[in-house]
Amino acid sequence: MTGSTEPIISVDGVTFGYGDRPVLEAVSIDVEPGAYLGLIGPNGSGKSTLLDLMLGLRRPDDGTVTLFGEPAHAFEAGERIGYVAQDATKAVGDMPVTVREAVKMGRYPRRLVGRFSTEDRRAIREAMEQVGIADLASRRVDRLSGGQRQRVFIARALASGADLLALDEPTVGIDAESREAFYELLCGLNATGLTIILIEHDIGVVTTYATDIACLNGQLCFHGDPNELVETDALTRAYGTDQYVIHHDH
């Protein structure tokens, strides 16, 4: 994990649109090392676009984005980032690989030519153990449940030695029990120092588990402590109607 005290991500005055359609306007937000940032907002509010900008997958029309102190669009140390996109579990559905083989992929950016080293094998084994899928190592990924597949993606990121884990609505289509276990897993990983950014439509999940929350609808309506969110009008401004937050027991 990174030992720097500088923000892992710094978004400064960012504006972005698709053609003539504005999506984000004058958004500024920092993601500190060790944060667990939840991004919330209605559909079309710019959450996924903001995450893309943070990870350097898109360039802003105006403003700047830095990632680990470098311009995000020019950042090349991809092994430091674990990214689970929307519908990732569906995309892997036709991959005829085992869990161990999928997690091995996380070591490719760090691996020298030739065979996997002892360190590689240790990192792969520990990553599977950390997310609770060591017993599934020989199982094909396309035969796993949605929750198990998500754990494979996270294990792959951990095997790479990622400092940042970014997830875009990772539990869509996953049953409620598996969702709770999944978010408990993320909390445990965050407790080890892993920085997490999570896009989630369930406001209650974010306010329960995240340590930091950003509420968007084109503009940044709120950024701060989840416990303070309900004391503001940010949800009304973002969603256009009163939102009731249900906290999840954990």
Image (tube, rainbow, N blue to C red):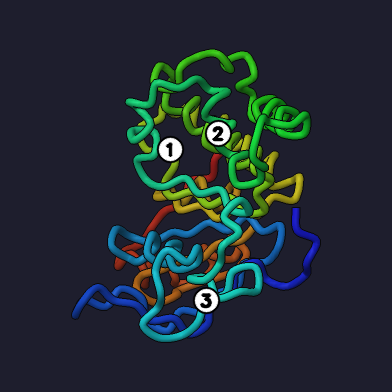
| Residue 203 % position (x, y) | 45, 52
Instruction: Give the amino acid type for the residue marked by disc 1 in the picture.
Output: Thr
Q: Residue at x 62, y 39 (%)?
A: 107
* Sequence-earlier tag: 1 or 2: 1
Residue under numbered circle 2: 182
- Measured as percent of width and height from the top left, residue 162 is found at 65, 49
Frontmost residue, 171 versus 204: 171
Q: What residue do we see at 39% from left, 68% from top?
A: 58
- Residue named by callout 1: 171
Is 238 or 145 nearer to us in this picture? 145
Q: Gap in Å between the C-alphas at discs 2 and 3?
A: 29 Å
- Assess whether mark 2 and mark 1 are in contact (beta carbons under 8 angstroms): yes
**Mark 3 is on which residue type?**
Val
Residue occupying the point 46% across, 79% down: 27
Q: How far apart are the alpha carbons under marks 1 and 2?
A: 8 Å
Image side of residue 148 versus residue 184, left or right: left
Q: Which of these two is toward me, 143 or 111? A: 111
Q: Distance between the residues labelled 3 and 1?
A: 27 Å
Labels 3, 1: front one: 3
